[in-house]
């Protein structure tokens, strides 16, 4: 198994970033690796609660993932299981991985550290890295004019 860690600086307070990570409206602004739309976002943000997100990429392909919230510590930390339920990385079919997001206040807003672990192969890690980089870049852009 393998993992990836990405770090972003976001021009918004941790509580606002946390809401963007956990609310359907927030998720619709950034989820997915390109500018395709989020088609469905469902969240039950509590330990043991579940999420499900379906998005369409610009090439027309649709992908859907779901999982369970393992840790919810607003506004500092979010941990969830991750499973592809439609499309996604072929090496991860039927497998469950783990996403950990830590939010730390900094002078300019929030430093977000994103770790996706328990990925099955290096190929899968590379695919997830590309996808999450695109999504997190969208999250940064979403708040680029917001100095709250």
Image (tube, helix red, strand yellow):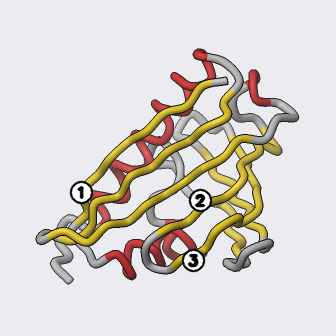
Name the residue: 70% across, 34% down: 88
Q: How far apart are the two marked residues, 2 and 1, measured between alpha carbons?
A: 23 Å
Name the residue: 19% across, 68% down: 106
Residue 63: quarter of image: top right
* Quarter of the figure with the C terminus: bottom left
Please, what secondary structure does the residue beneath circle 3 have? Answer: loop
Name the residue: 49% across, 73% down: 26
Q: Residue 145, percent across and down?
A: 17, 71
Q: Is residue 39 left or right of residue 142?
A: right
Residue under circle 1? 9
Q: Residue 59, percent across and down?
A: 57, 33
Q: Is residue 67 left or right of residue 5?
A: right
Q: Nearer the viewer, mark 2 or mark 3?
A: 3
Residue under circle 2? 38
Residue under circle 3? 23
- Mark 1 residue crowding within 10 angstroms, few (<14) / some (14–19) / many (20+): many
Upstream in sequence: badge 2 or badge 1: 1
């Amino acid at each position: 198994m393998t993992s990836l860690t990405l770090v972003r600086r976001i021009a918004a307070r941790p509580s606002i970033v946390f809401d963007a990570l956990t609310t359907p409206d927030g998720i619709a602004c950034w989820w997915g690796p390109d500018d395709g739309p989020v088609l469905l976002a469902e969240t039950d943000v509590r330990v043991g609660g579940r999420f499900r997100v379906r998005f369409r990429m610009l090439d027309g392909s649709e992908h859907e993932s779901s999982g369970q919230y393992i840790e919810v510590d607003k506004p500092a930390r979010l941990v969830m299981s991750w499973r592809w339920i439609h499309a996604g990385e072929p090496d991860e079919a039927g497998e469950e991985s783990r996403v950990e997001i830590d939010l730390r206040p900094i002078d300019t807003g929030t430093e977000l550290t994103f770790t996706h672990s328990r990925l099955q192969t290096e190929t899968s890690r590379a695919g997830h890295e590309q996808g999450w980089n695109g999504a997190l870049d969208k999250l940064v852009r979403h708040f680029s004019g917001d100095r709250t």
